[in-house]
Each structure stands twice: as C-alpha cells, then as structure tokens.
Amino acid sequence: MTRLEGKVAIVTGAGSGFGAGIARKFAGEGARVIVADINLEAAEAVAAEIGGSALRVDVASGESVAAMAGVAGPVDILVNNAGITHLPALMEDVAEADFDRVFAVNCKSVYLTARVFVPAMKASGRGAILNVASTAGLSPRPRLNWYNASKGWMITATKAMAVELAPFGVRVNAICPVAGETPLLKSFMGEDTPEMRAKFLATIPIGRFSTPEDMGNAACFLCSDEASMVTGAALEVDGGRCI
C-alpha cells in the first residue's frame, strides 16, 4: 500500500465527504496529505486521523488560496474537491447570489489553485491534478441547472488543462461521482426522505450511492504513477448512472 510513497498531496474540501475519503486513501498509500477545508475543525479532525496536516482555506478567495499555497509549499498532487450546490429549483428561480457562489467555489477555485501550484509543477516536470466533477456535468438532472453547468465547466477545464500541461509532465484528470453519502446529498435532493432516496437510487444501475471510499480508490489510481499515460480523462465513478 505504497503507491503514493514520498508524494505530497493537498486535498481541498477534505474535512468531510469525498474529500475525506480521498485524503484517507492517499495517506494509506504513503502520501503526506494536507487536509484543506473552510471548516478548520473538520480538517484538523481528518488530519489527526490520518497523520496529516490541516489548513483553513476559502477556495473562492484568491488571497486565501495564495496563503494556503504559501504554507503548503510545492505539492506533487493537487485535488480540487471542494464544491457546493444550490438547492433544487427552476433555473430562473435560482438567486444570483447562489449562482455566483456555485461558480466561485466550483469553477473559479480551479483557476485559483492552478495559479499558485502549477508553476512549481511545471518547473519540476511532474505533477498530478485531479478535479472532482460530477455526473451532473455529463447527464444533468432537472432543477440543478447551474450546478450541472458548473461541473460541465470543470470537465472542460480538465481537458484544457491536460492539453496545455502535458508537455511539462503534468497530468490533469477528473472523476465524476454520482450522488453520495456526503453533506451535499440533502441539498441535491431538496429533502432527505426515504421516497426521495429511492427516486435517486432508481437512476443508478448498481443500486447504491457513491461512497468516499469509491472516490478515494479512483483518485488514488489517477494520481499514481500507474496512470502515467492517463490525462484529460473524466472517469465516471457512478455505478452506471451515465450509461
């Protein structure tokens, strides 16, 4: 279990959910993991569990991301996992402030982290970036329109980054989970009831939600040297949801 031995990884939004699952898997595979989250207490709890370090970051703020990078220093692996959604609503009823926040956290953050971490990766001739997108960017659900669009943006950004950075030895991939047992699940569904869960599960052929462990396993492969020929991929980790 040493596929990431000697690597330094930073995972945003790693205080809970998929990010925590990715951080745990990376640590279990030998990486030194920096757990970054807007909730410092949650980040510190995960970091204590895995023997990593914790940093507070607001990924929508250039100043906050720059400060995070200044403390973290160069990294081998960057995982852009932090994300939010708006509540289910007709596209024209989503408040402008909610739209702006979704795109700031889900999209602008990818630009902000690239700005501070990519130069050192290019200089070293190596690095792996993983963007946590969503099946929503491939097969949108109604009433989550602007969240869907933000994740579609993330997938296109992944491919654009991959093309530009490949000559420098830096790989960029994305994973696309289906809804999972994370703090965002209730927001996706609008209400967490047995009926609503059954409705969501009916769209997943394997018949269960994504788990943090599922995301950790997929992320570990894409960020390891085993995937040295894989870049620009948007891997569906969705139990068949997008078929």
Image (cartoon, rainbow, N blue to C red):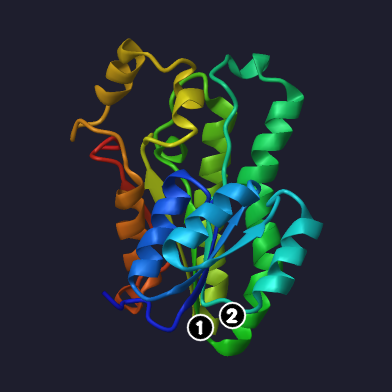
Q: Where is residue 97 drawn, in percent x and y?
A: 76, 28
Answer whether labels 2 and 1 touch (C-beta < 8 Å). Answer: yes
Mark earlier in primary sequence (2, 1)? 2
Q: Residues within 10 Å of mark 1 (few under 14, many from 20)?
A: some
* The furthest residue to the right: 63
Residue drawn 52% across and 82% down?
167
Say what amino acid the circle numbered 1 marks. Answer: Arg
Q: Is residue 130 above or below residue 19?
A: below
The label number, if any, that marks residue 126 in the structure image? 1
**Hey, which quadrant is residue 140 in on the image?**
top left
The label number, if any, that marks residue 121 in the structure image? 2
Q: Where is residue 15 drawn, in percent x and y?
A: 53, 49
SS at mark 1 in the image: loop
Q: Is residue 190 above or below residue 208?
A: above
Q: Is residue 30 visible?
A: yes
Q: Where is residue 129 drawn, in percent x and y?
A: 51, 67
